[in-house]
Amino acid sequence: MSSEEAGGGACYRREELARAAGVKARNLRYYQERGLLPPPRREGRIAWYSEEHLVRLRLIDELLGRGYTVNGIAELLAAWEQGGGLAQLLGLEREMTRDWVREEAVTMTLDELRELFGPAARAEHTRRAAELGYVRLEGEAVTFPSRRLLEATLALVREGVPLEEILDAGEFAQRQAAVVADRFVSLFRRHVIGPDGLEGLSASRMEDITAAVAALRPVAGEVMAAEFARAMARRAEEEAAALLRTDS
């Protein structure tokens, strides 16, 4: 995604904003006409949208997904704005969604991909990796959203692990990570936000929840990293003991 910095925050053109929010570009004008989305800042003929636009657009999309109508969302946003709670709500959404994935992307051509992985890589592996979200294919360009996962995959391939089995393991890891994420989000929803959700919360309470999100964001990752390290240590000890028994 291409963006420029202005006023200390990222700026987006219309198509960039729509792509970042996962909506159709034509919806932006419609939302602006209905009063859901503030107008962009203009420099000549260029319209620049800010991070606040992105946050609000994601909120609109989330509310639509929950069954709200456009008119209902407009009334809801107006009520929050009049009550002074919209800034807190948008701040909470931004705090809950930002910084979870901070990865360096790597882009190469298909020829460079084949050269990197050698004969171990086949077209079906690339297609499956795209289905799992490990790569993005755009014509002759291949983008790995995560340099760390690319380097880990290469290390395994160079040690003789088949790509098919690496992708199997990656798919398994994705499913397990989704289960863990659901568990942590559920805990936060029940015990930090509360059973009634955000309805009726005061601005000060919203600020408290936003602060709690910032404080607790690293906890899930730290817990999983610690538990995975403990599990790997136990499993490695068991495997080492089994190998020793086999050789004796």
Image (cartoon, rainbow, N blue to C red):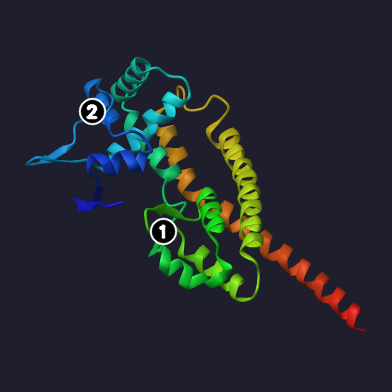
The Cα–Cα distance between marks 1 and 2, rounded to whole angstroms, is 30 Å
Q: In this view, which residue lies farthest toward the bottom?
A: 248
> Which of pointers 1 and 2 indicates the residue nearer the eye?
1
Q: Is residue 96 above or below residue 70?
A: below
Crowding at dot 2, Cα within 10 Å, few <14 / some 14-19 / many 20+, comes out as some
Q: Is residue 119 above or below residue 188?
A: below
Locate residue 64 relative to residue 238 in the image: left or right.
Answer: left
Q: Is residue 37 above or below residue 95?
A: above
Residue 70 in view here: yes
Q: Nearer the viewer, residue 27 or 77?
A: 27
* Residue 213 spot, x, y in % from top left: 48, 44
Considering the numbered disc 1 on the image, is that residue within a helix, a strand or a loop? strand
Quadrant of the image containing the C terminus: bottom right
Residue for point 48% across, 68% down = 114
The amino acid at mark 1 is Thr
Give residue 162's mark: none
Locate residue 130 relative to residue 161 in the image: left or right.
Answer: left
Q: Nearer the viewer, residue 243 or 124?
A: 124
Considering the numbered disc 2 on the image, is that residue within a helix, a strand or a loop? helix
* Quadrant in the picture for residue 58: top left
Crowding at dot 1, Cα within 10 Å, few <14 / some 14-19 / many 20+, comes out as some
Which residue is labeled 2 in the image? 29
* Residue 90 spot, x, y in % from top left: 36, 35
The amino acid at mark 2 is Arg
Give residue 143's mark: 1
Q: Nearer the viewer, residue 242 or 144?
A: 144
Q: Earlier in the sequence, mark 1 or mark 2?
A: 2
Residue for point 64% across, 42% down = 183
* Quadrant in the picture for residue 84: top left
Residue for point 46% across, 54% down = 101
